[in-house]
Structure formats: C-alpha cells, structure tokens
C-alpha cells in the first residue's frame, strides 16, 4: 500500500475518504484512457502518479464531482481525460 494513503493528510486535503476514493478512481480512468500525467515520476504505476498529483495540488474534484486540474480557467473547461466512452 502507498504510504500517503495511510496518512490523514491526503484525506483532509480532498475533503474526506469518499471524495478521495472518487478522485482517485476518476483520475485512474483518465490516465488509462490516455490522459497525460501532471507530475513526472520514475514509476509507471498510475496509482502513484494520481497520489502525487493530489499531494502536489495538481487535481481536485470540482463542485460537480468532475476531476479538475488546478489552474484551469473554470469548471466548464474540458479536462484531458482521454477518449470518451462513446468513442470507444
């Protein structure tokens, strides 16, 4: 298990365990669909990438429950989540 998940800091950063789980799952789907990582790591483990993106405040859940990238102009901005399910 990743050490960051054992700490309360990441849970508090996101706003609770449910939100953390949701953010991780949605970002993992985006990475698996071809979205580019927002951090550079020496690992190919997508879970480690997502955890570091959260810890470095690169991603968060917007009020609509969608993954948002820090620094984007607004909630209507499209996040590079890879291809849409309808496109597959």
Image: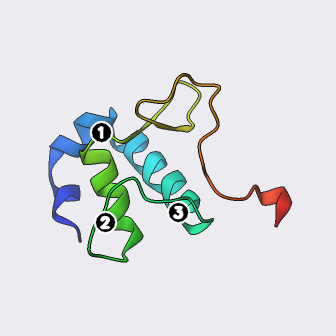
Q: Position of residue 27 (x, y in %)?
A: 50, 54
Residue 87 placement, left or right of 39? right
Question: What number is the disc on residue 57?
Answer: 1
Quarter in which the N terminus is drawn: bottom left
> Label 3, on which residue?
31
Residue at x 31% of width, y 66% of height: 48
Q: Position of residue 69 (x, y in %)?
A: 46, 38
Disc on res. 48: 2
Q: Are marks 3 and 2 in contact (CB under 8 Å)?
A: no
Give SS at disc 2. Answer: helix
Q: Earlier in the sequence, mark 1 or mark 2?
A: 2
Q: Nearer the viewer, residue 29 or 58?
A: 58
Could you say which quadrant of the image residue 20 lies in?
A: top left
Q: Quadrant of residue 6?
A: bottom left
Q: Quadrant of the C terminus?
A: bottom right
Q: Position of residue 3 (x, y in %)?
A: 16, 63
Q: Residues within 10 Å of mark 2 (few under 14, many from 20)?
A: some
* Residue at 43 percent of width and 59 percent of height: 37
């Amino acid at each position: 298990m990743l050490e960051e998940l054992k700490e309360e800091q990441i849970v508090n950063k996101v706003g609770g365990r449910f939100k953390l789980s949701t953010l991780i799952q949605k970002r993992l789907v985006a990475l698996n669909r071809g979205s580019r990582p927002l951090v550079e790591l020496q690992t190919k483990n997508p879970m480690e990438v997502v955890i570091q993106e959260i810890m470095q405040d690169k991603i968060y859940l917007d009020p609509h429950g969608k993954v948002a990238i820090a620094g984007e102009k607004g909630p209507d901005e499209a996040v590079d989540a890879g291809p849409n399910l309808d496109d597959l």
